[in-house]
Amino acid sequence: SSMQLSDPIKGFSFNRSGPLDMRFSGTGSLTAAEIVNSYREKDIADIIFRFGEERRSRKIASAIVARRPLETTTQLAKVVEDCLGRSRGRRHPATRTFQALRIAVNGEIGNVARGIKEGINLLQLGGRIVVISYHSIEDRVVKNSFRDESALCICPPELPICDCQHEPKIKFVNRRVKRPSPSEVKRNP
């Protein structure tokens, strides 16, 4: 929620100083501080690349490791900004890095995959499942999960003969992404 994300104590915002926490629940053991201060440079770069889709992840990870220890969100944001430079657009240069750390800390991608699997398992004959995703990382998980659950075979391609005995649980009704019409966007921007 916006209240959660804007609360400096939670450590999600780079606009106001707060601890490098980023846990939604506050109960998990992994924090953003642990990642930036104790993970290997390569592992930090992988997280930023995979969950933030940041192509300059190695450069950012190197800068983070060089400036350790980092204790606050504004310190981390400054490291990323110093590394990448201030962008001319609306987006702060640390946006992707913060997104990646938040996703990693909260296991968000695993939660999406588990949610889809559980949703499919709850479907009754004739039921439908619809998923709204907010960025390409989630979208990829949704598409891959649906593809696997609708396939006759999920064996690795290198196997010459199928032996998975996979039974499709769903059938695609629409393979294309549904987008709102211009009039719907106008009514509900």
Image (cartoon, helix red, strand yellow):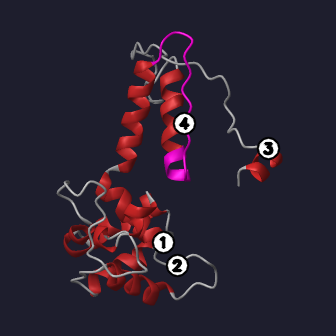
**Image position of 28 (left or right of 84):** left
For the point 79% across and 44% down, the residue is 181
Disc 4 target residue: 131
Three-letter amino acid code at the position of disc 3: Ser
Task: Compare marks 4 and 2 and give the one earlier in the sequence.
Answer: 2
Asked whether 82 or 72 is in front, the reply is: 72
**Image position of 182 (left or right of 68):** right
Find numbered disc 2 in the image and state the secondary structure of the residue it sits on. loop
Q: CA distance from mark 2 to mark 1?
A: 6 Å
Disc 3 target residue: 181
Image coordinates for residue 100, horizontal then vertical, percent: 40, 63
Find numbered disc 4 in the image and state the secondary structure of the residue it sits on. loop
The crowd level at tag 4 (other Cα within 10 Å; few <14, some 14-19, many 20+) is: few
Disc 1 target residue: 95
**Image position of 48 (left or right of 32):** right
For the point 69% across and 35% down, the residue is 176
- Tally of numbered tags: 4
